[in-house]
Image: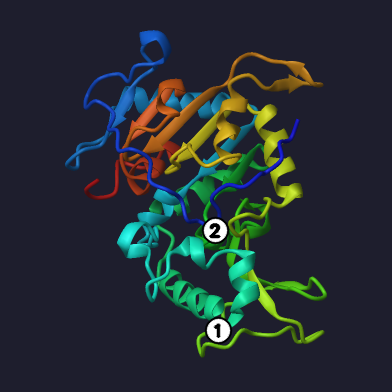
Amino acid sequence: RTPSAGRVDRDGLVPRPARRRAPRGRAARGAEGSATAGTLTLDGGAGPDPALLAEARRRLSAARRVLVLTGAGMSAESGVPTFRGEDGLWKGARPEELATPEAFARDPDRVWEWYAWRRSLVSRCPPHAGHRALAAWVRRRAGSALLVTQNVDGLHQAAARAADDDPEGVIALHGDLFRVRCTGCGWETEDRSELGAGGKAPRCSRCGALLRPGVVWFGEALPEAALRRAWSWALASDVALTVGTSAVVHPAAALPRLVLGGEREHGQPGAQGCIIEVNLESTPLTAQAAFSLTGAARSILPALLDPGNSGPEGQV
């Protein structure tokens, strides 16, 4: 059953979990002390373990359906700010004080001025090699892989366009920083102009009501259609590939776990799926992952998803 979205963190503003690193060069430990299939660590420019990488690639290739879930770590490698701690302050305000319906109702000009600043920062961040490899791979899978992201920066959509794929195929659970929605008539569109840069909230060209950023704010529910599609896809998937997600922001954090015991055929329980995790550090999901690939997504994804790739990109 698709859950209610509830009140969780939104708008790409993800809390940092307690820092826990996977042990270097050893298999990660699973539940009750059982070893997972293995931990690949890319450290100091070292190349991937060819055998482990090949096995993870085989699991992906053999899967009838794959759910891909990405989080803030994927975008951080492109230089997208995480807006955490002191670095997240804007004119003395925290993101949690600005990314809410109440803040917009009180002072839409101030909220839009903050979003104009954010949009300006993010617009200078290009998709990295991991985005590009993932977009090309999803396109090659021809409908048997679904990309779900918690990020609002539009980098996956940009990579999809570059791969001649439909960016609308990306499920952006928390919305898109470069989309706007009318608070009056509901009209929605992409807009990459400098909206709000002058400290004035933009208005709808159709009805004159205020426009708002097309993101999910704190206290708002996730878009039901997007969540329902992601949920049903996870239940029918054989493999979950998670990249750069802290695995603590719900309901998105539940999606990979659904793959572990989903419904494979006609609503009947199927064989247990598996999780392939790509992350710079250990997460609550690591113990359940069949493959925990520790390192930068820009290095691991090209090596994992493109068999013709000779190795990782640069230092990790």
Q: What residue type is labelled 2?
A: Asp
Q: Label 1's element?
A: loop
Q: Label 2's element?
A: loop
Q: What residue type is labelled 1?
A: Gly
Instruction: Give left or right: position of 35 versus 115.
Output: left
Instruction: Give left or right: position of 138 versus 47.
Output: right
Q: Vertical placement of 279 versus 51: above or below?
A: below
| Visible residue check, residue 98 | yes
Q: Vertical placement of 21 versus 103: above or below?
A: above
Query: Which residue is located at x 39 percent, y 33 percent?
Result: 283
Of residues 129 and 222, the one nearer the viewer is 222
> From the image, which quarter does the C terminus lie in?
top left
| Visible residue check, residue 214 | no
Which comes before the other along the chain, label 2 or label 1?
2
Label 2 environment density (alpha carbons within 10 Å; few <14, some 14–19, many ≥20): many
Of residues 167 and 51, the one nearer the viewer is 167
> From the image, which quarter does the N terminus lie in?
top right
Label 1 environment density (alpha carbons within 10 Å; few <14, some 14–19, many ≥20): many
Q: Which mark is residue 11?
A: 2
Instruction: Give the image location of residue 147, x and y in percent.
Output: 59, 45
Instruction: Give the image location of residue 281, x and y in percent.
Output: 32, 37
* Residue assigned mark 1: 196
